[in-house]
Amino acid sequence: MSAVEDRLAELGLTVPEVAAPVAAYVPAQRDGRRIYTSGQLPMVSGSLAATGKVGEGEGLVSPDRAKELAQTCALNAIAAVKSVVGDLDQVGQVVKVVGFVASDPSFTGQPGVINGASELLGKAFGDAGIHARSAVGVAVLPLDAPVEVEITVALREDD
């Protein structure tokens, strides 16, 4: 097991099997030292953990729950990276995170939601988990998911 997986285990988490694509794409693609993941939904054991828009109020996914879902997305992104590289300790840097939040029109807390992904990546990769980021509110996401996260990582130069 990699040091990254050991750190995740300390958090009570394991890298899941890579989520199956829901359309015509691959979960991750390598280009030289970079691995780009496709957008990862909060899938757990093949099913969405929640659906709907994020916001405050009845019938909406709470911001706190959405932050947890963003962590699940990041864990799925880690699985996608592992499916390409094999050993997560080959990751030298998480370069960029892009997070999408299916938002109720009045919701403006997208950065706080995507912190779920950013914080997990920091805990998993340590200093190599520090990254640039975008957090974007959108009207709807695939399968009515509340959150979607994609990451770009750079492999160590000696690999």
Image: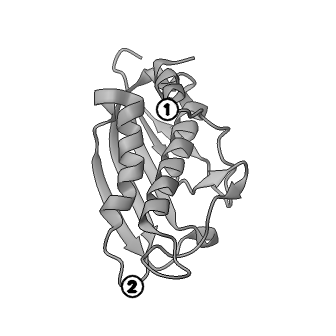
Q: Residue at x 31, y 74 (%)?
A: 108
Q: Nearer the viewer, residue 88 or 5?
A: 5
Q: Position of residue 138 (x, y in %)?
A: 42, 75
Secondary structure type for disc 1: loop
Separation of marks 1 and 2 at Cα, in angstroms? 34 Å
Secondary structure type for disc 2: loop
Q: Quadrant of the N terminus?
A: top right
The answer to whether 12 is drawn above or below residue 136 in the figure is above
- The answer to whether residue 73 is left or right of residue 22 is left
The answer to whether 141 is drawn above or below residue 127 in the figure is below
Q: Is residue 57 visible?
A: yes
Q: Residues within 10 Å of mark 1 (few under 14, many from 20)?
A: few
Three-letter residue code for mark 1: Leu
Q: Is residue 33 visible?
A: no
Name the residue tied to disc 1.
Answer: 11
Of the two numbered discs 1 and 2 on the same chain, state the one appearing first in sequence: 1
Q: Nearer the viewer, residue 139 or 28?
A: 139
Q: Which scheme is used to colour this image of the protein?
A: one colour
Q: Residue at x 32, y 69 (%)?
A: 109
Q: Position of residue 140 (x, y in %)?
A: 51, 77
Three-letter residue code for mark 2: Pro
The answer to whether 152 is drawn above or below residue 93 in the figure is below
Q: Nearer the viewer, residue 143 or 126?
A: 126
Q: Position of residue 28 (x, y in %)?
A: 55, 43
Q: Residue at x 62, y 48 (%)?
A: 26
Q: Position of residue 58 (x, y in %)?
A: 52, 82
* Numbered badge on residue 148: none
Q: Residue furthest bottom?
A: 105
Q: Residue at x 61, y 64 (%)?
A: 50
Name the residue tied to disc 2.
Answer: 105
Q: Residue furthest right?
A: 46
